[in-house]
Amino acid sequence: MRNNRVWATLEQLAQKPEHKDLKHSIADVERMEALTLQCGDLYLDCSKNWLSLQVFEQLQQLAEASDLKASIQKLFNLETVNTSENQAAGHTTLRDPNHQNRKHNLERMKVLAERIKNNKITTAFGKPVKQLVNIGIGGSYLGPRLAIEALTDLQSESQIPVYFAASVDDSLINQLFQSIDIEHSLFCISSKSFGTAETLMNAEAVIEKLKQRPGYLPNDNQSSLMAITAKPERAKAIGINDSMILPFDTTIGGRFSLWSSIGFPIMLAAGSDAFEEMLDGANIMDNHYLETPFDKNMPVVLALIGIWYRNFIGLSGYACLPYDARLRCFPKWLQQLMMESTGKMHNLQGQTIDYPTSPWVFGDHGQLSQHAFFQAFHQGIDALPMDFIGVLDHDSPSQRFLLFNMIAQGAALMSGESHEHIDNHDCPGNKPSTTLLLNSMNPKAVGQLLAMYEHMIYTQSVIWNINCFDQPGVELGKKLAKRIEKHVQENHLDDLPLDPSTQNLIKKVMNHEG
């Protein structure tokens, strides 16, 4: 990477202050037009970034030097892009209206959804399904929850309300059972591997609760359990009927899986038509990503700006700030997508890299953020890239107020303010940001939004020469937790080679339980 001629040029440009002077560059109308992009329902204004046209051109050359175009083709041609598992990444096929994968996936989901809604499947108590509880974590939780909140006005318009059980935490599970009507609930165990410890523990807790309840009589025609997994045989092994299992392909990565049968809760909550329209929206962004030159390609431009800040300016944070409560889960979804996909220290050749990759991602609903951490944005000596996200289909003064607040924050961060006689009230300005506007919160727009950020991540992984479809670091802590639990159960904790601090903490837990 660092031997690349374009990389060296960008390092030199990053040292020149004129490329980070927003107060002067923002007045350049030609530059603003060059850094304003549109695709479908999305409008992207990147002009408030530390990005001169010279830097922008060099970043595009970096993408060319990284053979990005060929890598995009590899993704869509189902060539091997997940090198650690030696397989393709199939999530884009689920959005392509002409691909058999989409047709087969939708057919299975629709059949089950219709049977549930028409009471041809009842719960194991013989009662109609009025609620769905999604038991899953990570990509099996964040994507579906985000889409449901976006498409059902925070579930107030849900056809079948969906609840989520993600964390292994007795207090949350107990709270869940107090909130639902158990006998009218369908519990959906969502796990690609059907081996995720947290999900299986929650599933076991649910099954135990169901068995203890009078009238629980599961059979071929009534079930309180279903599963969504790439390992259907494991779901059958715990007694879930074939007819209640929605499989998906192993080429679908967990954090890219909401387009698959993992999105079944979205279909139940928002309807089959809305789910299909979301796929159509994602397909619009897929085609834009495939066909649009880099300078007007929204995922590519966002990716290049992120690389400019991370690798050349040296900024380690990234904020995502949606000014619409329906997107309040978006920062968490993006956090997992970015940090789990590109938080890597080895390149595709297995070598340790010497340049940073994923930034630290955080965010929240924009207006709540203003009263939490925007003070540090305005007056802190650090800067970080941030994405403001707004939705234009407002029909109330409060929504309009939110949009004006969002626009004002971007302008204030850029321009700052000086108080001649009160030094500690100065805001220096020259803080970068990007503004993204959705025409409306319709399913197509949501599909475009999510697919855009997916492709942004893939673009960065190509330029960083890393695999964005695996997550080896996630498994390390889980493996150690299992070893600790096993040694505790066998009373052989001292045989486990652990540091004194960890040993002491485990003993504190055991002594407290005793």
Image: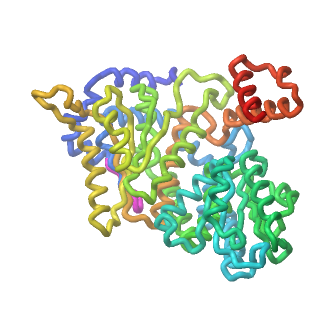
Quadrant housing the C terminus: top right
Q: Position of residue 69 (x, y in %)?
A: 53, 44
Q: Is residue 196 above or below residue 498?
A: below
Question: Residue at (75%, 58%) from the top-left corner?
Answer: 206
Question: Residue at (59%, 62%) from the top-left corner?
Answer: 95
Residue projecting furthest to the top: 500
Residue projecting furthest to the left: 421
Q: Is residue 349 above or below residue 455?
A: above
Magenta region, main secondary structure: strand
Q: Is residue 123 above or below residue 490?
A: below
Of residue 196 and residue 206, the one placed in the foreground of this image is 206
Q: Which residues are magenta?
A: 36-42
Could you say which quadrant of the image residue 439 lies in? bottom left
Asked if the stretch drawn in magenta spans residue 240, the answer is: no
Of residue 464 and residue 124, the one placed in the foreground of this image is 124
Q: Position of residue 459 (x, y in %)?
A: 52, 41
Could you say which quadrant of the image residue 307 lies in? top left
Left or right: residue 287 compared with residue 392: right
Of residue 371 and residue 279, the one placed in the foreground of this image is 371
Residue 93 in view, yes or no: no
Question: Residue at (75%, 29%) from the top-left corner?
Answer: 511
Colour theme: rainbow
Left or right: residue 231 compared with residue 337: right
Question: Residue at (72%, 17%) from the top-left corner?
Answer: 500
Q: Position of residue 334 (x, y in %)?
A: 51, 46
Could you say which quadrant of the image residue 294 lies in? top left
